[in-house]
Image (tube, rainbow, N blue to C red):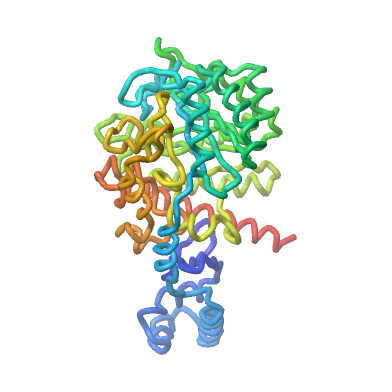
Amino acid sequence: MVHQYKNNGYNIVMDINSGAIHVVDDVVYDIIALYEDHDRASIMDILSSKYPVEDMEEAFEEIETLIKEESLFTEDIYKDYIIDFKKRKTVVKALCLHIAHDCNLACQYCFAEEGEYHGRRAFMSYEVGRQALDFLIANSGNRRNLEVDFFGGEPLMNWDVVKRLVTYGREQEKIHDKNFRFTLTTNGVLLNDEIMEFCNKEMANVVLSVDGRREVHDRMRPFRNGSGSYDLIMPKFEKFAESRNQTNYYVRGTFTHYNKDFAADVLSLADRGFKQISVEPVVAPSSEPYAIQEEDIPELCAEYDKLAKEMVKRNREGRHFNFFHFMIDLEGGPCVAKRLSGCGSGTEYLAVTPWGDLYPCHQFVGQEEFLMGNVWDGVVKTDIRDEFKLCNIYAKEKCSQCFARFYCSGGCAANSWNFHHSITDAYDIGCELMRKRVECAIMIKAAEADEEGEE
């Protein structure tokens, strides 16, 4: 199975199963498009008015060499592998600690209902958080590196507990031969120098929530009195990013139906000096006025192309920045199991509420049918865990013919559930945008290789 497309002057051929990427000339590109359904003589006849015979003969030799090298038209050898992989004993390696089910902003698109998550406002106590870390250690098996994200609502509203839990985690590292990788997601309202200093010492990564341009951000991320938050948080975020040497953080935004020209938001963040940027499509029911609609997809795909071209231009000018959804590793990247099975929600990764309940991930919190247990008793509803354990690209019909399946790993289970009431379906708008992002990311890699070849 191959996928072919043209982008920014490059003819790109992806061999889906091997992961090989080929940038080819026009004659090779056109022959590959016909190769599986026509014999050699037929192809040469079809293209005879377009290319000289000797060019086509050379192209066929090149294609046949790639096939022999198993980098073109390869077979899928992973289905049995993932079935065996999923049979292994499950260990938990990451927790999302809902340190605060409360927030000091009133973001319009917030899936957490301003931090309430279909329930009540609450802060996680130190005792619950400590038990969560104990649960993680006890259920991590031989895995040494463990991840804990302090999440909300707004976790800085419960900052003292965050600090105490980090201290406790560091103590437990020595006792149990574990290594905690702590991360924090914040809207920045309560950010100050003391918090930045602590995070720079203890947090492996921080996510800073901002939507881009001032007018876009303030429309969707206001305070509860309706006033904007942009002018308060941006100087703090700029200082924070610089204090971390422009690494190990992301400014993370959301674009909606209201700002389909989201490339301008990405570039506005880059122009303010941020080097690590993520601006993602909102996921919301079509009934919401800010929701992305199916008819928006062509415009949004064109915007991704626009952004990718501008990034190529800026890279050549020495003004490089990373855009999360265009970051792709064509040589290494995630291991095969990760590519096939996804984020590990419900199995390796769990969310913990302020009162200690366990859910498959932060987006399922508050949906009682997905309550798996708690940090004292552990996972008691193992049927939920087993259902997520079987969730992989081969369990999803929509993935079977999708060229991006080894890059997105089947998409988000929560989005699938919310739109189709099944974790083995897929959120269709998200799929379309993911495919375009993969194409753009590979084009950027082609441009980088082109640049290196010219040097």
Q: Which residue corresponds to the image point at 43% horizontal and 39% vertical from the top-left?
A: 350
Q: Quadrant of the C terminus?
A: bottom right
Q: Position of residue 4 (x, y in %)?
A: 45, 66
* Residue 78 left/right relative to 165: left
Most foreground residue, 171 or 109:
171
Q: Quadrant of residue 45?
A: bottom left
- Residue 133 vs 303, above or below: the answer is above
Identify which residue, 81 or 248, lies in the foreground.
Answer: 81
User: Where in the figure is residue 393, as x and y percent of width and height?
Assistant: 38, 58
Choose top left, top right, bottom left or bottom right for residue 399.
bottom left
Q: Is residue 428 visible?
A: no
Residue appearing at x 64%, y 44% in the figure: 314
Q: Is residue 165 left or right of residue 81?
A: right
Question: Is residue 223 or residue 454 the one in the foreground?
Answer: 223
**Relative vertical location of residue 358 with respect to residue 223 in this rendering, above or below:** below
The N terminus - image quarter: bottom left
- Residue 190 picture quarter: top right
Q: Residue at x 51, y 40 (%)?
A: 138
Q: Residue at x 45, y 51 (%)?
A: 90
**Residue 176 picture location, percent across and down:** 62, 40
Q: Is residue 285 at all visible to an observer of this figure?
A: yes
- Check the image and name the residue furthest to the right: 455
